Image (cartoon, rainbow, N blue to C red):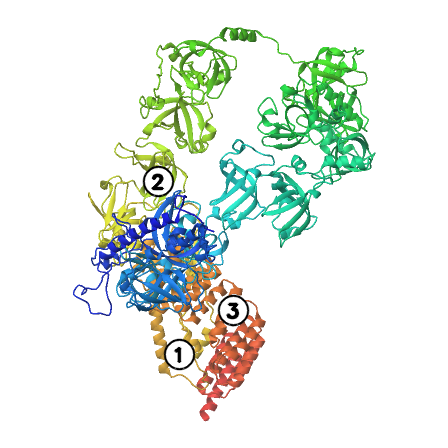
Amino acid sequence: MVKKIPNNDGKEVSNSQEADKSVQVKEKVSKKRKIAILSDDVDFVRGKKATQSESKPLKIESDNIFKENADNVFEVSKGKKSKDDSDLGKPLEDLTYKKLSPGMLMLGVVTEVGEVDVVLSLPNGLTGFIRGTDISEEFNQAIDSTTDDDDEPDIEQEDLDLCDVMKVGQYLTCSVVDVTTVNKTKKVNLTTKPEIINCSVKKQDINKNMVLQGVIQSVEEYGYMVNLGIKGVTAFLNKGDLSLKKCDIVSVVVKTVNDGNLILGLYDAGTTKALSDKTVTTFSSLSPGHLVNVTVKKHAANGLRCSFLGGIQGSIHLIHLKDMYNDKAVQDVYPIKRKLPARVILINPENKRVLLSTLNCHVAMETPCNLLKKGDTVEDVEVVRVTKRGVYISLDNDLTGFVHLKKLQDKETEKVSANFKVGTRHKARVMGFRILDNLVQLSLRQSDLDKPFLSYHDIKVCSVVMVTILSVEEFGLVVKLADNIRGFVPKLHLADITIKNPALKFKENQRIKAKVLTVDPSKRRLTLTLKRSIIKNSTADVCGYDTLEKDQQVTGWIAAIKQFGIIMNFPAKIRGLVHSSDISNVPMTEDDIKKLYRIGQVLSCRVVHVNPEKEKLSLSLNLLEELETKNSEETTGRWARRGQIHSCTVLSRSKGDNDGLIVQLDSTKEEAFLPSYHLSDHKTLSELNVGRLQPGTNIPQVLIISKKMKKIIVTAKPSIINWIKSFEQMPKISDLSVGEFVVGYIKDFQDYGCFIEIGNGLVGLCPKACLADSFVSNPRDVYKSGETVMCKITNIDKEKERLLVSLKHSDVGGEPTMSGPKLLEGYFSELNMFSNTEHQPVGTVVECEVVSVSENWYNVKVGDVSGMVDRKFAEEGLKVGDVRKGVVLDFTETNRGTYYVSLETSLVESVVGRGKKKKLTEGTELSAKIVLTTEDYFVVVLPDAAHRFGYVHRRAHLSDLGEKYRDIKSGQVQKVSVCRARKGKPLLLSFVVSEPETPTSQSRKRKRSEDQDIKFDDIKLGEIYTVTVKSVKTLQLNVQLSRKVNGRVHITEVTDSPNPDSKPLTEYKHGDTLQVKLIGFRHSKTHRYLPITRTDYVRSMGEFSLRESVISSPKVREIKENEKVDETKDLISSLVVGQQITGFVKSLDSSGFVWISLSPGVEARLWHTLTSTDKEEVEKWTERFTVGQCVSATVFSTRDNKIDLSLVGPMTADAKFWCLVKATLPGIGLKLQINARDFGIAPLTELNDNYSKDPLSKYHENDLVQCVVVEPPTEGSRRTTLSLRKSRTSQRWKKAVGGRKVVNQVIDKPEDLEVDSVYSGYVKSTSPTAGIFVSLGINVTGRVLMKNMSDNYLKNWEPMFPIGKLVKVFILQNGPKVELSMKLSDLKKGKKKEEEEEEEAGEEEVQRCLDDILLERYQESDGEDDEHADDAEDSDDEVKEVEDAPKIVFTSGKAAVSEESVKESVSLREVLVDEKSESEEESEEEKPDETETKKGKSFLKREKKRKKEEAEEEIRKIEMKSNSAVLETEDDFEREVASKPDSGASWVCYMAYWLGLGNVDKARLTARRALDTINYRLEEEKLNVWSALFNLENSFGTQDGLMKVCKEAAAVNDSKTVFLRLAAVLDKSKKYQELDDVYSSVLLKKHKKSKKVWCNYCSSLASQGRLGEMRELLTKALKSLPKDKHIRTICHFAQTEYKQGDPNRGSTMFENVLTTYPHRLDLWAVYLDKTISLNDNEQTRLLLDRMIGLKLPMKKMKFFFKRYIDFETIHGDAASLKNIKEKAQSYLSSSQDE
């Protein structure tokens, strides 16, 4: 039920107030629209005869609707005709919050319906809000009726809510009310009130089929009355099958119009056609949501400008154009005059601007379908379009994503980097959705990918998260999990204990661990807990009723205590009841339960019953231990109880997290657990006893300290057992009192202290402040879990049964029952109790053999037992095997027993020769020598008592931290007192600690008594006093004048002339007496000077000086009341830049500063790059400076009341510094940081003495570079010009080069240029009219006119010369205006000004095979219409192999054909020009008896020869040009392709040039340029470039990229030719799997009737050795090919068998063919050649005999005889040759006779 709705300020207002406000808004918006409408003649009637005033058609400006104006956000139309030509190509500006104004109409999509407002998605990613009072007046009236107490509410409107009238995904036409700022965030307030959105529509403007938006006013019997908000108009909507209710917002279509009475129909976007100019007759009647047909008028860089409805101008942004999320140009997809449907999404009535959308989802008015959700990670997405604002990403399901520039990478950038170009693939994270733009907002930043949460949907209940505290309130904590994700920790869940004041425990920005209890994404609510018992307990992870089972143990917290039981809460809003009968076995009242339990207490429960459907949960608790014990006593006496002492027997050892012993109580036979730390009061004995207490060992007494669920825990600590024995029964809290000493053990640690259990379940808290007399930051550093302690009770809360205790030595040190000797006596008693090892007693002399030597110890053997000897108690030089006598100092049972022995000769002799031991009495003081130190005690020897041995405990009591004796080492002599001396028992001693009174201490006492009466009122400025040093700090001496007067001597006031790098305070120590002068008073916290009339003496301290100049000077500055002292300003007034000054290091800042103290109140900064001229020292600046170090520096700057220092001098001309690179400025140079406030620019011409093409590529942000100041800053300008040239910065470099000149000399002025010389420079700017401006030096710029750019005419030359490009120029004039030329003719004749830099020795030559670029020899198209190919030539060509192409050698960027490669392979002309065309191979028909005429043959040969010579001549010219020195730079190739844009060879050589430099991307772009440039009629030239691009992608790209390029080529060329060339590339690179895919999926399917396809595949299979597949391929080929191609195909397969298969099989194939076609001369010739190649002369003669025996025409027989004679001439002898000649003569004779 919505009762009151808050306004923008968060205050609740009544509906009447909101109604009044809405009326005012309506009148304001309506007035604005009327003014805008009346400013132009916008009312026009189409289809009627125009009146005189209407004779001129309406012209609406087509400027961008978001063009800003000084007077208004949008430019207001003035009725003037726009100049379309001036706007051509200008980009459309994006819609932003700043460009919104009240009254603007927009189309929005509902994305969220809240309790008080509705969220809408607006164009261009904007978000709007509709408050409940801005929906409609009908909705406001319905809300009022539900809140009226006098009238009975309408049943239909009883539960009216925003969700009833608004649905997610609904399209709404809305109007902007205002744009406000809430917490630095813009908020757009909208309204859907019909009287506002339709305020400009007039009654006479309404026509049939017009679309309007209105609100259901009432529900009638046959329909609905609709409020359209138009004066004088009533509208009725037929009911039909509709089911609407009052207050619904609907879009309707006008069916009939009858004088203001409208019959409406519900708008259906699927059936309604676009509006015509007869329906919408005025601009004011146009509304967002209208579907119109638009005509493209202009193209913009990011959209279209169009017109519709007879002259209304509109714009369509790129994101609202379908099929435009790719790299295609707008003009290619949407040509001028194209018509397309579009929907209006924005109207600005002030300037008549309209935005439209052509997206299918908007045209169909359907909410875009999106399967993704915020926070999803999308793998391997592809960039499809790049803009200045970001990149567009292609997603699955026809979705498109957008990545803003700031979301591309974590490093801030001003433009899209090359890593995100079109085609690249990345991993993205969904950050949100722009519903109206149909875009998914993505991020590629690694930080966003790594975030665990992006929305509330990502958070799971019971998950443990790290949160940051935002604010600490009385009711709990407001925390942050991530950006825009907030949570709340109730006060009940701040800790396991109740915290009354959270501000004392928690601080803002503190990071803590929490567990999620509930999460509600729809309401953006999150609840967490900080209770450690819930966070660490897995049984508290309850996520639903259906996850619970009977008898399952769960952990929750008490929500309420009732008479009938306890209500428990669990995560995920699960509640359960522990009935009172399940709390205890005895009846309990509500008061009894409240005494035992409290709200918020964490309890473990057992599930008794669970019903997930009804969400009911019944639980049970264990009985209370006290009641359980009482009940047990009443029922039976045979069970053990807490507090009882039993003996027990060890059963086994428990390892792991619960290390200890499983024991059995002897009296009850119950099992119990004895933790390892409960075995003794001493840690060392606990560790020892765990190992030596074997199963079956009896322990005399253990104390039961806990019994829960029949699990008994016992302790064997004697101190706790003896303390419990002092009570008649188990002590309760009522038995204890404040000030009493108790014994317990450390149970748990918290950040604020530790908990100590003292028996009977009583636990006391020892706050951190009470742990020790000194400050303890972490309790775990001084105590261990389970450690026995003695504590003093300081506070008792008997109601809550809570104790506060103290462990301070000052509190418990006086308790005698647990003193050091007592602890030592107990230690030896426990040690001997379970000892089962015999050993020599302490003080026995034994023989030791050295077995090994370490740095500090000798490892020895004492009998069969190992031993250790401290090298301090043994002679030097002992070696392995040496045997010495020693004295046993101690024995430990660890590691099978170990002796500690002393080999000190004097000690051994004293022990051997000692006399009778004297009896020692308690209290006797003796001198003792420390001979051994252990963790628990010291072993000492008493020289004055017959060298007896004794023990001193390290701790004075159980809680002693042992700090008092921490510095005592072996070998020291201490005074001890006898505590216990009994025969047969260890001698127990204690140290005698006394501080003898020295003359110094006596004088201090006297001085203290003399000065104790001096007060602040008694001291005066300028007086000299004697003070005592209380402490020496790093930057000051803390001194004391009297008991009430303290002060300091700052390090700058110690001496007048400190030595550099010295620390003057190290000369002073505590207790020194100094003569000082009082120079002022300072505040003890802020250190600011106080006036002499001060009254706050508590916070005052004296400022003293030790400097002789100050002591001898009578002047002292007095600070008066309310006088403001600026010590820094006073010092700056006396400083000059460049002045030397001395200070002391105060601190080192991580941001790069060394802070220097110049006086007690003045600090200066030293930037780390100004600390040295040595790079290594600059990089290690933090190691060179320490706090308190004296530094002598130069004043660098005193601007803005801040002092900057330098150790390398001031900033003057020729000064050298180390600077940090802050940014690379393309076309300009480097931005360098000199210090924190000073920056400089290093131009491109000053980066190196040898210019390079990309001088900025080797510099990165924060790189350290050395530079020299060329132009220092002046008073009028802070600009600093720097240089990185080695010739300027390095003297060593100058000596190395000697007198040689640098490659690119420094040009300081135009006169330094020499006319008719060649120089290098960088393009500074270009102008279409003025030409190119080239920077030759810092202040020298020359101009290249267009006529001087090239010897040839250059069209579109501007892209060829981008800013920052390195060019060579020829000096035409060097006057005030420098004129340059870039013509090749001028560059050739001009003498070189730069010398070529010598190439480094052993530079590796990079060779590129031209065939890798061209893929294969350039082939002609695969035609089938040439019927006159020569049979013999064609036969030879069938078996001819593709030879290797020449290699291009690239050295220093030059391209030339290697002579060696030309000798070894085919020349370039052979690659680019084929010897035959593919048509000659396939177009021949089988004509066995037909022969060609001589005339036809000769003509073909001549024509073929002529074409070949022409092609060779062209290639020869290219080769000559490639070999020359002209085509050696990018400029040379650019001129070449500019002069011959249709030459494929030129472009291929250009690609080879880039590949030689290793720039694959440039080579790829060059290929694309070539394809766009070459005339479309020159198919062969384009095919050559495609082939080169295939090879490039195959060598340097991916398989997907190669196939993509191939498909692109096949779309614009002959498909078979393209794929055959691709197959050749794959075959040559041995990518056989991909090759098979190309043949099987494309060539053998689409071109199966081509003989060449089958023959090429045959050759490929044979080369791979796949002969079986090759032979199967022949069968498939004969089934697919026409019969006229069978013979040639079989012939090719037979030749392949001869070459790479089985020659016998090949011979058989030839025989079969020749049997059918015996007259085919060409077949016989090939058969003969293949037989000769086998070198089987006999077989060859048999074949030749068959051939000459054939009955063929004489012409063919003559060919056979000639071949026979040639064969015998080579392979035969004279007889065989004579024989064949006779046969030939015989044949001629017989033929003539016939």
In the image, 1500 versus 1632, the foreground residue is 1632
Q: Residues within 10 Å of mark 1 (few under 14, many from 20)?
A: some
Q: Residues within 10 Å of mark 2 (few under 14, many from 20)?
A: many
Q: How many marks?
A: 3
Asked whether 1248 or 574 is in front, the reply is 574
Does residue 1150 show up?
yes
Look at mark 3 in the image and give the residue it sits on.
Answer: 1660
Mark 3 burial class by Cα count in 10 Å: few <14, some 14-19, many 20+: many
Direction left: furthest residue: 52
Quick check: marks 1 and 2 in contact, CB under 8 Å? Answer: no
- Residue 67 placement (x, y as % from top left): 28, 52
**Element type at marker 2?**
strand
> Disc 2 vs disc 3: Cβ atoms closer than 8 Å?
no
Q: Give whichever of 649, 185 is nearer the camera.
A: 185
Q: In terms of sequence position, does the residue under pointer 1 or pointer 2 come before the other? A: 2
**Mark number, residue 28:** none
State the CA–CA distance, disc 2 to disc 3. Answer: 58 Å
Disc 1 element: loop
Nearer to us in this view, 1416 or 785: 785
The percent position of residue 880, horizontal first and vertical second, equals: 73, 27
Amino acid type at image mark 3: Ser
* Point 48% across, 29% down: residue: 1183
The residue that label 2 is drawn on is: 1231
Circle 1: residue type: Asp
First reached walking from the N terminus: tag 3 or tag 1: 1
Q: How far apart, in angstroms, are the residues tagged by discs 1 and 2?
A: 67 Å
Residue 1573 appears anywhere in the view = no
Residue type highlighted by circle 2:
Lys
